[in-house]
Image: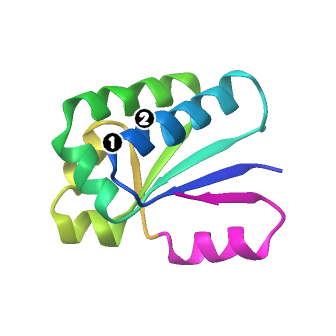
Amino acid sequence: MNLYVLWTNADPITSEKMVFMYTLNSKLRGWWPEVTLIIWGATAKYVAEDEGVQETMKSLLRAGVKVSACRACADQLGVTELLESLGIEVILWGVPLTEVLKGDDKLITI
């Protein structure tokens, strides 16, 4: 069973004190075999505009957290290339998210 974190809330405190903290510790401490952080909506713009958050994304990736963004959101917000330059996967998430919801993996929505 794997963990997916659907990150839609661009509040800096929520991002730092829940999303980043939990995804990183989940991976480092082996709480879940695989941890995927899904950037969706406002968070795509937040990552693109905040250099500190960009560094956090790089740290998460180095730790083994899979970081992926919604292509439709990233394209509409004009941040696709920037996200990809950080090593973030950018894909259409509608079908994969539906598969997660229908499957046995766990999903947290923030």
Give residue 12's mark: 1
Residue 82 figure quarter: top left
Which amino acid type is marked by label 2? Glu
Identify the secondary structure beneath mark 1.
Answer: helix
Is 102 a magenta residue? yes
Q: Which residues are magenta?
A: 93-110
- In space, the residues marked 1 and 2 are separated at their CA atoms by 6 Å
Measured as percent of width and height from the top left, residue 99 is found at: 69, 73
Tell me if 79 is positioned left or right of 41 in this view. Answer: left
Is 58 covered by the magenta stretch?
Answer: no
Would residue 2 be found to the left or right of residue 38 on screen? right
Q: Residue at x 65, y 42 (%)?
A: 35
Residue at which label 2 appears:
16
Q: Are marks 1 and 2 in contact (CB under 8 Å)?
A: yes
Query: Where residue 61 appears, x then y in whole percent?
Result: 48, 30
Q: Residues within 10 Å of mark 1 (few under 14, many from 20)?
A: few
- Disc 2 element: helix
Q: Quadrant of residue 101?
A: bottom right
Please tell me how many numbered marks the rendered image carries: 2
Residue 96, relative to residue 107: is it above or below? below
Residue drawn at x 48%, y 34% as measured from the top left: 17
